Amino acid sequence: MERLQKVIANSGYCSRREAEKLIVSGRVSVNNKVVTELGAKVSDNDEILIDGVKLYKEQKEYYLLYKPRGVVSTSHDDKGRKTVVDLINTNARIYPVGRLDYDTTGVLLLTNDGELSNLLTHPKNNVDKIYIAKIKGILDVGSIKKLENGVIIDGYKTSKARVKVRRIDKKNNTSIVQITIHEGKNHQVKKMFEAVGHEVLKLKREVFAFFTTGNLNAGEYRRLTIKEVKQLYGMFK
C-alpha cells in the first residue's frame, strides 16, 4: 500500500505537490469514491480516476534542458507564454524538476518520475544548485560573508551558501559571482543579492546536482542515460 499522492506522481501524471492539490480539491476518486484525505493509501488493484479519467502508468522519461530566457518553468501557462515543456518533443506528461525564473537560463531537468522529482527538490536532501550571477556593483567581503551565513528574505533566513567572485568590472561597476545554494525558493538568488544591496542583471544556473548544460545551446535538450538516472537515485541512498 502506498500513499495516493505518491502513486499519482509516480504514474507520471504530475508532481507530488500537484497531486496533493488534486486530492484536496476533490478531483480524485478511488474505486468510484472521492478521496480528499492526503493520508489515504491505495494498492495496485485499486482503480484511480482523476476528473473521471482512469489513471495509467507512463513509461518514465528524463530530459536535461538548457533553458533559454523568455520561457516559463511550468507545464501550462494561463497567460499563453511558451513553457519549458513546449521545448521537449514528447507525448509523455513531463514537468520541470523545480523552477527557473522567466529570464533565468541554464540547467533544468524535466521528467514524469514523481519520486525522483520529489527527492531532487526536497530541502532536506541538500542538492547543489550553482548559479552564475552578473550583478550591479562590486561585491565586498562583508556582503560575501552575509550571503554565506544566510540572509533574511521574505521573512526567513536562507541556509548557508558558498560564494565566489569570478570577475570584477570596475569600469562598468559590475561583478560576476558564483553562488551555490541548496534551497529553491521563489526568486531566491535575486532576493539574496538584493538583501545585500546588489541588483542581479543576468542569471544562469550552471550546475544542478552533477549536471551542466555541456555542449547544448540555449533551447536544446537531451535525454538522460540510464546510468545518469541511476546516479541520481544513488545520491539518496
Image: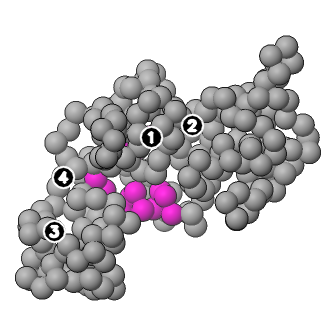
Residue at which label 1 appears: 108
Q: Cβ–Cβ below 8 Å for labels 4 and 2?
A: no
Q: Cβ–Cβ below 8 Å for labels 2 and 1?
A: yes
Residue at which label 3 appears: 50
* Secondary element at image label 4: loop
- Sequence-wise, the earlier of marks 3 and 4 is 3
Where residue 159 appears, as percent x and y from the top left, is: 71, 60
In magenta segment, residue 111: yes
Q: Residue at x 16, y 68 (%)?
A: 50
Q: Residue at x 52, y 33 (%)?
A: 103
Which residues are drawn in magenta?
Answer: 108-122
> How many marks do you count on the picture?
4
Residue at which label 2 appears: 205
* Secondary element at image label 3: strand
Q: Residue at x 12, y 62 (%)?
A: 56
* Residue 141 numbered tag: none
